[in-house]
Amino acid sequence: MASNLHRKTHPATSFTVYDSQPSSSARFVKEHPDVKAAVSIRELAQTCDVIITMLPASAHVLEVYHGKEGLLSAAKKDALMVDSSTIDVKTAKEVAEKGREKGVAVVDAPVSGGTGGAQAGTLTFMTGASTEADFNRARPYLMHMGKNIVYCGANGNGQVAKICNNMLLGITMIAAAETMNLGARLGMNPKLLASILNTSSGRCWSTDTYNPCPGVMPNVPSSRDYEGGFGTSLMAKDLGLAVSAANEVKSTIMLGSSAHQLYNQLASSEEFGKKDFSVVFKWLNDNAKRFGK
């Protein structure tokens, strides 16, 4: 994402990066000699008019934005800050409100499209902003990294869209894994089964783009022992956000809750905890071998 943003940013524009791991910043600067590395979050805020962040969880976002040496402690007046983390809706709204108090526009813009989309610059950004004007300020920068930039309404709505999307993704990946596992155990050729599914009513992204069964598709995690991709711990986290949000508004999500429990189990496992979330297929197979016939 950062490489695409840098490549498409006007050469006369100053470009600064910061990472909590200095080696990551140093590597990016080595690959892009015109880029500067900030030594602190505060320095980044003092240097930049536009800042884009992506962090693991809500606690990290609060610390980076609200902390004593955080972005809002030293932000330029009228700065634009875009957070592409996947976090809870309440935190997204809180960060945006604190930004407004400081005269800073904060936009929540979580992404979908996976590592492939990030590399290709074809991500979807689900964007929440207090005004359409703030969205329009952020849109040109997001276009450098994505293909579909959607205005979802007020701050927090970007997170609503992302949480709903990832709950559906987690559910459908489990369904795709169960389906492919069943077909294979009944003697069906997995590639043939996938081709039928993908021209039938059961087709979904988890079958036609990111199939969890090894050997069905090249260049997806299932074809490389589930390395890379979107980790089981991240899926467990996002499903947890969905469950928490559903509890707040008393929305029934039986399948979402079940998917959360399954991914919690995978994420806590030494064998599956660092694998891509499509490893649920391997987990089903291992259980069949262990307990079935």
Image: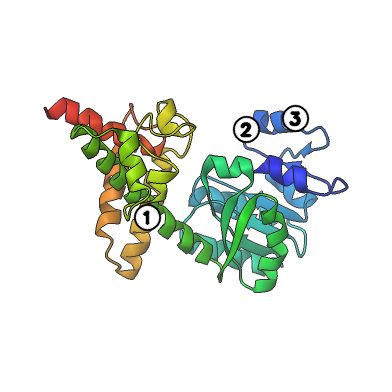
- Front one among 105 and 43: 105
In the image, 75: left or right of 221? right
Q: Residue at x 68, y 55 (%)?
A: 143
Dots 2, 1 in contact, CB < 8 A: no
Q: Residues within 10 Å of mark 3 (few under 14, many from 20)?
A: few
Residue 162 is situated, as x and y percent measured from the top left of the image, at: 47, 57
Residue 275 is situated, as x and y percent measured from the top left of the image, at: 40, 32
Q: Residue at x 81, y 32 (%)?
A: 33
| Between discs 1 and 3, the one toward the N terminus | 3
Q: Residue at x 25, y 51 (%)?
A: 258
Which of the 4 image quadrants contains residue 65?
bottom right
In the image, 62: left or right of 239? right
Mark in the foreground, 1 or 3: 1
Question: For numbered disc 3, what is the local secondary structure?
Answer: helix
Instruction: Name the image colouring.
Output: rainbow
Q: Does residue 43 appear in the picture of this structure? A: no
Q: CA distance from mark 3 to mark 2?
A: 16 Å
Residue 109 is situated, as x and y percent measured from the top left of the image, at: 58, 58
- Front one among 20 and 25: 25
Q: CA distance from mark 2 to mark 1?
A: 33 Å
Going by the numbered disc 3, the residue's amino acid type is: Glu
Q: Where is mark 3, residue-wise?
A: 31
Question: For numbered disc 1, what is the local secondary structure?
Answer: helix
Q: Where is mark 2, residue-wise?
A: 21
Image quadrant holding the N terminus, namely top right
Going by the numbered disc 2, the residue's amino acid type is: Gln
Going by the numbered disc 1, the residue's amino acid type is: Leu
Dots 3, 2 in contact, CB < 8 A: no
